[in-house]
Amino acid sequence: MSILRIDLIAAVPDIFQSPLQTSILARAQEKGLVTIVTHNLHDYAKDAYRHIDDTPFGGGAGMILQCEPIFDCIEKLMSEREYDAIIYTSPDGKVFNQDMANELSLKGNIIILAGHYKGIDQRVRDRLITLEISIGDVVLSGGELPALMITDAIVRLIPGVLGDAESALSDAFMNDGLLDCPHYTRPAVYRDMEVPDILRSGNHSKIEQWRREQSIEKTKKLRPDLFDKYKEQ
């Protein structure tokens, strides 16, 4: 079985380090289930000051990541292996969802380019990028955090990464696109708040029915857009 490789490219790759060395992402790498490699765009700069950005043609505020260091980095990686997807994190992209995470988790090699400053030279997007992903209608200081979010969502789906094999399959959005049901643990009573009797009944078929009903009602209340898709199915 081939091991998924994710190459993260960024102007500020230090942002990646702590999340990649902690918890599930760290354990997945330690188990040899995924290879995650970070790349510093400044290593591909041409001048002594390691500049990778410049002012935009036509004027305007902000700085733009130059195309040359990005091309050099990605083309070097492409000379070493074939990539199934070259992703750019951008507010313009398709909004990331569980279906996209599921699909990407089945790939072999992925590049994720994190935007920074005001954006990247359009020629990179025209020539190299195969998929642009947004995490929603919000502007961040850079694309490093979205790149990490995408990476985490992909990696946790790889068989063997999570301790409970069914955990990922029962997460929100994995069950016909519905939100997850409420969950409880010990103690059964806390500050006059009781765990629903059905969950303590031991009747697993009724418990599953209750959880399904709760997921449907929760989705209908909180995410009517997802509920409408569920009804269409």
Image (cartoon, grey):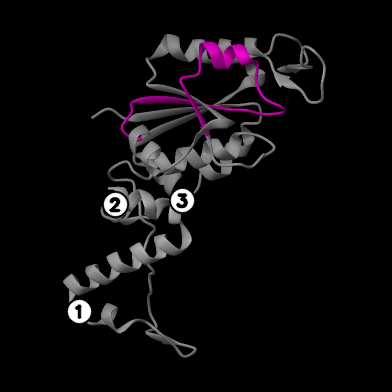
Q: Is residue 211 above or below residue 70?
A: below
Nearer-N-terminus badge (2/3)? 3
Q: Residue at x 82, y 21 (%)?
A: 60
Magenta stretch encompasses residue 117: yes
Q: How many marks?
A: 3
Pointer 2: what residue?
Answer: 169
Amino acid on which the number 3 mark rests in the picture: Ser
Q: What secondary structure is marked by label 2? A: helix
Q: Position of residue 204 (x, y in %)?
A: 18, 72
- The residue furthest bottom is 192
Q: Residue at x 64, y 9 (%)?
A: 68
Compute the Cα span from label 1 to label 3: 32 Å
Crowding at dot 2, Cα within 10 Å, few <14 / some 14-19 / many 20+, comes out as: few
Q: What secondary structure is marked by label 1? A: loop
Q: Position of residue 127 (x, y in %)?
A: 52, 10
Pointer 1: what residue?
Answer: 202
Amino acid on which the number 2 mark rests in the picture: Leu
Q: Is residue 162 visible?
A: no
Q: Position of residue 153 (x, y in %)?
A: 43, 43
| Mark seen at residue 94 | none
Q: Is residue 133 above or below residue 76?
A: below
| Mark seen at residue 23 | 3
Amino acid on which the number 1 mark rests in the picture: Gly
The span picked out in magenta is 105-133
Compute the Cα span from label 1 to label 2: 22 Å
Q: Residue at x 57, y 37 (%)?
A: 16
Q: Of discs 1 and 3, which sits in the foreground?
A: 1
